[in-house]
Image: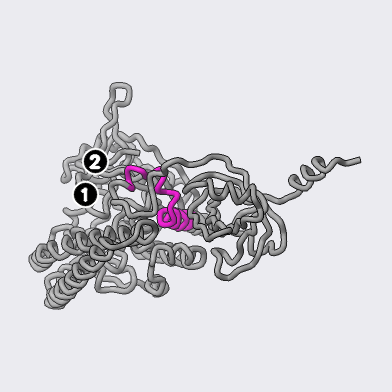
Amino acid sequence: MVSPKDWEADMAESILTVASRDLKTMAGQTVRLRGWVQGKRSGGKVVFLLIRDGTGLCQCIVEGAVEDAFAKANEVTQESSLTVTGLVRLDDRAPGGAELAVSAIEVLQISKEYPISRKAHGIDFLMDHRHLWLRSPRPAAILRVRHTVIRAIRDFFDSNGFTLVDMPILVPGAGEDRQSLFPVDYFGEKLFLSQTGQLYLESACMSLGKVYCFGPTFRAEKSKTRRHLTEFWMVEPEVAFAELEEVMALAEDLICAIVAAVLEKNRPDLDVLNRDVSVLEKIVKPFPRMTYTEAGELLRGSAIRQKLEQELEQEKGRLQSLIKELEAAEASLATAKKGWQQEKQETRVRELREDIHELEQEIAVRPEHLRLAQSFAWGEDLGGSDETLVSRQFERPVFVTEYPRDAKAFYMKVSPNDPRTVRNFDLLAPQGYGEIIGGSQREENPDVIEASMKAKGLRPEDYSWYLDLRRYGSVPHGGFGLGVERTLTWLCGLKHVRETIPFPRTMGRVYP
């Protein structure tokens, strides 16, 4: 004969443990959900718990009649971990379209004084607590988009006949700018953290034809701009028997595949980030193209000046509106009751102050950006502000080609039409986000590339293995590098690249 306790244990074991994303398909079933308390509110004899389980959110209704569960629901705090059991009910108003009518709660741990409360926090505070901030809706949404981007990149190359080849991180010399190398003591020998996998990847290209590498890269640029990280992830394809036009076509197809994947899989996440998806829906082939020389003419032209002056006036007007809104919010905060009303007003005041600070900075740099654009001289590389101004003129990514030879890396092929330029391109994301891809056709002539090395102060003997690729069966070939974090900044509509990587490394930040 089965005892009541044994029967209850058997029933408990038969209850399915499910993910919140699947609840809508399980209406009328009693299930178990494991997660963390993201939010909580009480209304008399009812407690509403908002539970996060990594796949989504679930609203859990705990009624006073279920005494044990009701007592525990009143006890739990933000980020407490727990298991809830309950009946699945469909409700369009609930996150995900379903909720749980709770019959039991098992508290795993009570979270005490969780540092990231519902009130607003400054970015430095949030970055200091990045290990906890990742639990919040905004960074979690960005990480889901990042996952989609990385998967889309791999799927694109894997389905187009490319072979993944891993490249070394410890290297003996520069692949890009010698000034941005991170030195490493390697058993008494000075090595460096890799700036790019490209040089080594070219050797695999001569073996397998179409290859790519995907991993972390490092740049010791002493820059604190919104676009710079010292450690970031880059995908780099390399194709044998390819010239510049084929490499650009590959980059164009890759971007379209990434955008399509994000629009298909991450619209709810883009909503969390307040990203205007209509901007991304315009990303279709063909992308506009212009030469470096044409970009310089655009920067020096009257259209850029007029547009900048118009935007400056609009920003000044918006600044005045924000200041008035802040004054009203501060007045409301002074009279707000303690509790959720006060927290709401505190959050709004903090947001407005941050918006005002950022807008004041934008207004302050506008005249300098205009001066740099209007005085742009042929031979200079495009700076960040230049890329911003050029890319703001287009709704789709724009290719800029044929840069000056002296401004680019030694391995780029010299243009047959103008020996002052090279066969390269940068792909600039629209809305002012700037470069997300840089690529080129590689110089296959060993004499030309050796002369380029010497002209840039490099010792050919340090790259003897690389020159071997030109000595034994050299062919036209090319490739590019796509920065994952810069691409994410654009796709998610973010203001700073630091939000796109779980633990950003920038000048002055290596914690946590």
Which amino acid, mark 2? Gly
Residue drawn 12% across and 62% down? Answer: 364
The residue labelled by disc 2 is 508
Specify the quadrant that holds the C terminus.
Answer: top left
Q: Which residue sits at x=29%, y=71%?
A: 289
> Which x, y percent locates residue 186?
32, 26
Q: Which residues are magenta?
A: 126-151
Can residue 344 be seen at all in this image of the molecule?
Answer: yes
Residue 202, given in percent of the width and then of the height, sits at 38, 47
> Residue extending furthest top?
188
Magenta region, main secondary structure: helix
- Specify whether residue 430 is painted magenta: no
Locate residue 507, reporting x and y percent. 24, 43
| Residue 313 against residue 424 in the figure, above or below | below
Indicate the quadrant where residue 422 lies. Answer: bottom left
Please, is residue 40 above or below residue 446 in the view?
Answer: below
Q: Which residue is mark 1?
A: 224
Proximity of marks 2 and 1: CB atoms separated by less than 8 Å: yes
Instruction: Look at the image and tell me in which quarter the N terminus lies.
Output: top right
Q: Dot 1: what SS?
A: loop
Query: Sequence-wise, which precedes: disc 2 or disc 1?
Result: 1
Measured from the top left, where is residue 74 in percent x and y? 54, 49
